[in-house]
Image (cartoon, rainbow, N blue to C red):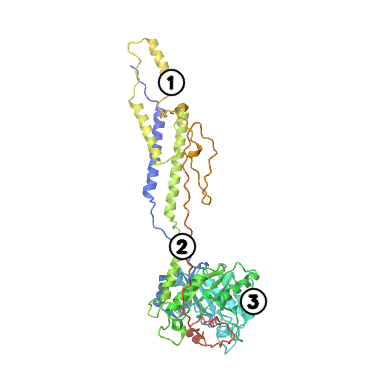
Amino acid sequence: MRHRFPHPTRIALTQLFGGFVALAIFLAVASEVFLPKQRPAYEIINTATISQANDTVGISDSDLYLKAMDPAALAKSLDQMQSLGVKDLRIVVPWALVETADGSYDWTAIDNMVNAATARGMGVMGVVTTTPAWAKQPFTSPYQPPSNPLDYGNFMSTLASRYAGKVSAYEVWNEPNAGFAFAPIPDPAAYTSLLKAAYGAIKAADPQATVIGGVLGSVVTWGNLTLNPVAFVEQMYASGAAGYFDALSFHPYQYTTPFSQGGPLLDSPLNQVTSIYQLMVANGDASKLIWGSEYGLPTSVVGEQNQADYIKDFLNKWSSLPFAGPAFLYTLVDRNSADVNDPESTFGVFRDDWTQKLAAQVIKDFIAAHTPPPPPATDPGEALGQLLSQVFQQFVQAILNAIIAALNGAFGGTAPVVPEATPETAAKAVAVIDGVMADDKGTTVTDSATDGTAADSSASKAQTDSAPSTEAVPSTPETTVPESTVPASTVPDSTVPQSTDPETSAAVPSTEAPSSTVPETTTPASTPETASPGTSPATSQPTMSTVPTSTRPTTTTVPVPQATSSATPDAPKTVEPKEVVAAVG
């Protein structure tokens, strides 16, 4: 009896192949075990960005400056804003109180507000107004513009440099189309000089910041006291304002007519903002937006129900205007909810005890309805795991291909092709190799017959040696189905239902010739379901009670001429609190 032992090279290659496959399986499994797919997600927020969408809702809170030195009060205000879903904040930056002497700054209050807001991921817009005594003529109002616009520009440069990446937008002054806010009289040309100085300074310090001009109140022209905002913007362009702002802003206050219903009324806030945009289009600024940086109503004048109804109407209409930017509501909390004499005390959507007014829920509901679901957060760990898994699979594929090529070269045969290296295919390969190794170690070859002749033995040996190796993985024989076993059938055209046109409902007969070999399975096309015609009921405007127009601000009474329309906008409201004015006056 003669025994045939495995060739040493053959054993080494098969063992090497099995080892690589085992390593590949280990790496693939380890990538799944030690790099789990479920990981904590961390959302990265750009804290300085204010979305310029027309359904963005922020809060304008000038009184926050008075709370800035009280961390608990400041935190309470910001927490209450966020409880409504508000993510953006408009604060006042009183130049007169920050730079009391030329080059001497006190940033404490501004730092506290900005840092607290950005720590919560809130966008911040600053309205910069009032002039320090050293920068204006003596014995004049703090709302007097600076004698030299470059002084304002220098302050804006320092401001924007300090808060780059934290403050998203800057408004240049506040309601300059009213004499009490831009003393002594509205002056579009002087305001444009201020705007030019501010724009270049801000952009040089923080190119990403948005510079907002205009900041206009919705008023009618009355002597030297107020100037219609449309006329003001027209004179701004005549003074060279084009190219010196990224957006304009507008304050569409009106207590007697809901914002959406102002179309038929002369000089309504809706008509004024539309006319302003038409001027922008005519001057090449069609791509720029108009921000609504203040809107609100005092409940001591209009009542809580009207405040809620008007704010809801405003948000719905404003968010439908294609040229509108974000809207900021004035303001967060009452100064004194019991004060029925000073309208400035009751603009809040919270009462002074922090209980909600009806308008607070309106804001919360609007924001919730216009907030898209957040995109899936990208986890760096999960991304790394997926990358390593792909690398491991590519590594396995490369190793298997190299080993198969080596086996082909060693034995002159055709080894099985591994389509893709995965844990499943690798496991199958190991099973095959284990079978080959077991066969090599336990199989013996005997002579064809113990009593045969030498010639028979030689022939048997020659036949055995000349036969190709069959120890590789046997390939599965391909089963061939004779064509004659597949019966041919024809389907009459009339039995194949066709799609039906919903308008004509006429069947279209098929013109295709039936298959003569393999039957074509035809699935009847479903006929679209035709809805019964109907009409949607007309949506009616909510009835809102008409309330008397209040006179704003309390420091100035603007008589309204008899010829003015019933939609005469209210006088603009100054953004600075009376306490700030008293401090700088």
Q: Hey, which residue is sitting farthest bottom in the picture?
A: 139
Could you say where residue 305 lies in the image, as x and y percent from the top left?
A: 43, 78
Mark 1 or mark 3: whose residue is earlier in sequence? 3
Instruction: Name the residue carrying label 2.
Output: 372
Q: How far is mark 2 from mark 3, CA to CA?
A: 38 Å
- Residue position for label 1: 467
- Residue 17 drawn at (x, y percent): 41, 34
Q: Hey, what amino acid is under mark 3?
A: Glu
The residue at 51%/31% (across/down) is 516
Look at the picture and state if 151 lies above or below 53. Answer: below
Q: Earlier in the sequence, mark 2 or mark 3?
A: 3
Q: Amino acid under label 2?
A: Pro
For label 1, the SS is loop
- Neighbourhood count class around disc 3 (C-alpha, 10 Å): few under 14, some 14–19, many 20 upward: some
Tell me which numbered mark, 2 or 1, is placed earlier along the sequence: 2
Q: Is residue 68 visible?
A: no
Given residues 524 and 337, the one toward you in this image is 524
Task: Identify the residue position indicated by label 3 in the image.
Answer: 234
User: Callout 2: helix, strand or loop?
Assistant: loop
Give the quadrant of the N terminus: top left
Image check: 141 left or right of 526? right
Amino acid type, mark 1? Ala
**Residue 71: which disc?**
none
Determine whether label 2 and label 3 are within 8 Å by CB: no
Q: Nearer the viewer, residue 301 or 145?
A: 301
The local crowd at label 1, few if under 14, some if 14 to 19, many if 20 or more residues have their Cα within 10 Å, is few
Horizontal and vertical percent for residue 190? 63, 80
Where residue 155 sits, quadrant-wise, is bottom right
Query: Could you give the CA–CA distance between mark 1 and mark 3, rounded to whole angstroms?
Result: 99 Å
The mark tally for this picture is 3
